Amino acid sequence: MQRRKFIGSCTAAAVLAAGSAGAQNSATAAGDIARLKALAAVIVPDPDPVLWSTGAPAMALERTWDAMGSESRAPVSAFLDRLDRAAGGSFAALDPERRSAVLRETLGPPSAWSDQFRSLRSMALRAFYDSPAGLARCGYIPSTQFAGYPQLCNYPPSRKDR
């Protein structure tokens, strides 16, 4: 009987700890998303300040972040923490010019860029180029809209029966 009480108390403690960790993780995730958007605004600068706060690229970046597993997020969060330490506080709170300077100082030459930054850069570029803003500013049409090679639609009569 005492063993059951002990197991029950351990289970209750685990459930309570998981609940508080979940609240802490959601707060951490919100902070990471804000820092990620600030970093994206440095990687792909745009004259429209709304683009990386509530625009289509920012929403795409959030969806990508939400789709990442916790194992994938951990090294990225560590890189964002490194940026905060280099900024002497919050990287997201800095003005855009200072963010660029901190990023340059942190990264060094392209040959020294970490894998975490490379994946963050890819996420930001993909979010921008796949958005209407990317199309309007660059004329880039995302390759995810590929529907096939048009020249192969008209097969010669000899190939239609294969």
Image: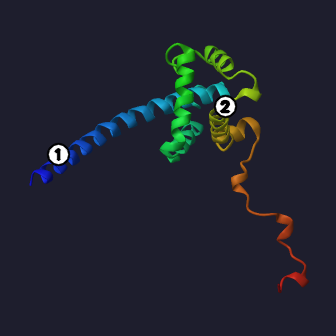
Return the residue nearer the eye: 111 or 155: 111
Would residue 157 appear left or right of 26 to someone viewing this image? right
Query: Which mark is on residue 114?
Result: 2
Would residue 32 appear left or right of 11 to someone viewing this image? right
Say what secondary structure mark 1 lies in. Answer: helix
Residue 91 seen in this snapshot: no
Q: Which amino acid does label 1 sit on?
A: Ser
x and y percentages locating residue 112 in the rendered image: 72, 27
Would residue 159 appear left or right of 28 to someone viewing this image? right
Number of on-image labels: 2
Return the residue nearer the eye: 156 or 2: 2
Earlier sequence position, callout 2 versus callout 1: 1
Distance Cα–Cα, label 2 vs label 1: 44 Å
Return the residue nearer the eye: 89 or 131: 89
**Quarter the N terminus occupies:** bottom left
Residue occupying the point 67% across, 39% down: 122
Return the residue nearer the eye: 58 or 138: 58
Residue occupying the point 56% across, 26% down: 38
Say what secondary structure mark 2 lies in. Answer: loop
Q: Quadrant of residue 161?
A: bottom right
Residue 78 seen in this snapshot: yes
User: Residue tagged by mark 1?
Assistant: 9
Query: Which mark is on residue 48?
Result: none
Residue occupying the point 73% across, 62% down: 147
Q: Residues within 10 Å of mark 2 (few under 14, many from 20)?
A: few
Q: Which amino acid does label 2 sit on?
A: Ser
x and y percentages locating residue 61 in the rendered image: 56, 39
Q: Vertically, is 47 above or below 97? A: below
